[in-house]
């Protein structure tokens, strides 16, 4: 079912019709908030036991009232006023045993009442998502990235996309204990890592991620290339870049990519570089082929 109408009236009628209903035949749902509507809308489904794919844009779904055992793909964007707590989020993930694609953008979680001991308990009961192949996390604060990745075990993940917005959330804890909570040995089968807006300190997560074959930098309106250069310079012993064979960069600022490549010193096994400047995003790629030894 695809409900992406620009009409507020259509959205309201559908919401009223589905409220509290059992949608026993629903397998796929795509729904977007009408253009110009301010704030998240809510879908109060009682049950959708056969739901396999959900794409929600500007909508909040009450996950506690839905059966998610068949869900394989979830894209949830822009319900920034939703207040699901971390315990609820953990329970949602636990119920998604078949999840293969998880894309969370602009999702606000409540960390109120969270303590080091409580997080330790969540982390001790790691959520295992064996089938998860693609994970996108955008709009989270840097410390949320660390904590959430530390809660989830995705041994077969092949694609990871991260982007942080440090001004959105504030740290709710009295101490910065979370900085010492580092996930270790993440994603041994990772093939592609995509990085958007991230500060240099947040890039410390790279110490704990297995080197991917392909690194993609989304530099449009960001300084990720410069931040990554500083990170590698200040952490010369990191092995993150050693396994990277292919690098793509979109919207890169002039000079940033050259500093990052620096004659092949930082990426000793790099074979191909593909770039588009911020003024050439609609033009064909410019590729550089890197010989052995830089």
Image: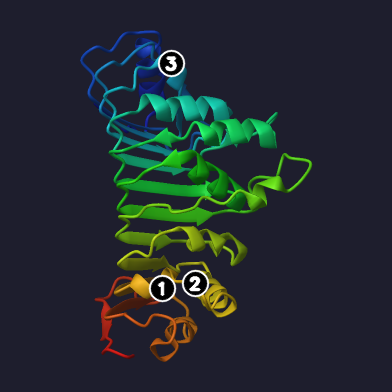
Mark linked to residue 197: none
Image height check: is 203 above or below 170? below
Crowding near the residue tagged with mark 3, few <14, some 14–19, many ≥20 C-alpha atoms within 10 Å: some
- Dot 2: what SS? loop
Image height check: is 291 above or below 51? below
Question: Going from the N terminus, do you reach mark 3 or mark 2 first?
Answer: 3
User: Which residue is depicted at the point 53% across and 34% down?
Assistant: 124
> Where is the N terminus found, in terms of image quarters?
top left
- Dot 3: what SS? loop
Specify the farthest residue to the right: 174
Query: Residue 15 placed where, x, y %?
Result: 39, 17
Q: Nearer the viewer, residue 211 or 87?
A: 211
- Dot 1: what SS? helix
| In front: label 3 or label 2 | 2
User: Which residue is depicted at the point 74% across and 40% down?
Assistant: 173
Residue 39 appearing in the image: no
Crowding near the residue tagged with mark 2, few <14, some 14–19, many ≥20 C-alpha atoms within 10 Å: some
Q: Nearer the viewer, residue 27 or 118?
A: 118
> Where is the C terminus found, in terms of image quarters?
bottom left
| In front: label 1 or label 2 | 2
Determine the CA span between mark 3 and mark 2. Answer: 47 Å
According to the picture, the residue beneath numbered tag 2 turns out to be 238
Query: Residue 222 placed where, x, y %?
Result: 52, 67
Query: Residue 92 placed where, x, y %?
Result: 43, 26
Disc 1 vs disc 2: Cβ atoms closer than 8 Å?
A: yes
According to the picture, the residue beneath numbered tag 3 turns out to be 44
Question: Going from the N terminus, do you reach mark 3 or mark 1 first?
Answer: 3
Determine the CA span between mark 3 and mark 1. Answer: 46 Å
Residue 128 appearing in the image: yes
According to the picture, the residue beneath numbered tag 1 turns out to be 241
Query: Residue 189 placed where, x, y %?
Result: 30, 55
User: Which residue is depicted at the point 48% across and 58% down?
Assistant: 208
């Amino acid at each position: 079912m695809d409900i992406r109408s620009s009409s507020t009236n259509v959205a309201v009628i559908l919401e009223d019709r589905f409220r509290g209903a059992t949608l026993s035949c629903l397998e796929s749902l795509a729904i977007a908030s009408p253009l110009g509507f301010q704030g998240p809308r809510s879908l109060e489904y009682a049950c959708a036991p056969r739901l396999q794919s959900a794409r929600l844009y500007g909508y909040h779904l009450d996950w506690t009232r839905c059966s998610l055992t068949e869900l394989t793909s979830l894209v949830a964007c822009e319900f920034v006023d939703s207040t699901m707590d971390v315990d609820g989020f953990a329970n949602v993930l636990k119920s998604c045993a078949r999840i293969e694609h998880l894309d969370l953008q602009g999702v606000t979680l409540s960390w109120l009442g969270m303590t080091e001991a409580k997080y330790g308990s969540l982390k001790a009961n790691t959520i295992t998502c064996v089938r998860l192949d693609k994970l996108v996390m955008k709009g989270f604060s840097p410390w949320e990235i660390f904590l959430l990745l530390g809660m989830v075990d995705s041994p077969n993940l092949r694609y990871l996309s991260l982007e942080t917005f440090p001004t959105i959330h504030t740290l709710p804890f009295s101490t910065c204990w979370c900085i010492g909570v580092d996930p270790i040995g993440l994603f041994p089968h990772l093939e592609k890592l995509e990085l958007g807006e991230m500060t240099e300190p947040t890039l410390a997560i790279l110490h704990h991620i297995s080197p991917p074959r392909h690194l993609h930098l989304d530099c449009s309106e960001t300084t990720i290339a410069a931040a990554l250069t500083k990170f590698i310079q200040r952490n010369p012993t990191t092995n993150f870049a050693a396994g990277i064979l292919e690098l793509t960069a979109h919207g890169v600022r002039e000079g940033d990519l050259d500093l990052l490549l620096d004659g092949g010193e930082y990426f000793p096994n790099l074979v191909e570089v593909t770039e588009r400047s911020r003024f050439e995003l609609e033009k064909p790629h410019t590729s550089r082929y890197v010989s052995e030894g830089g």
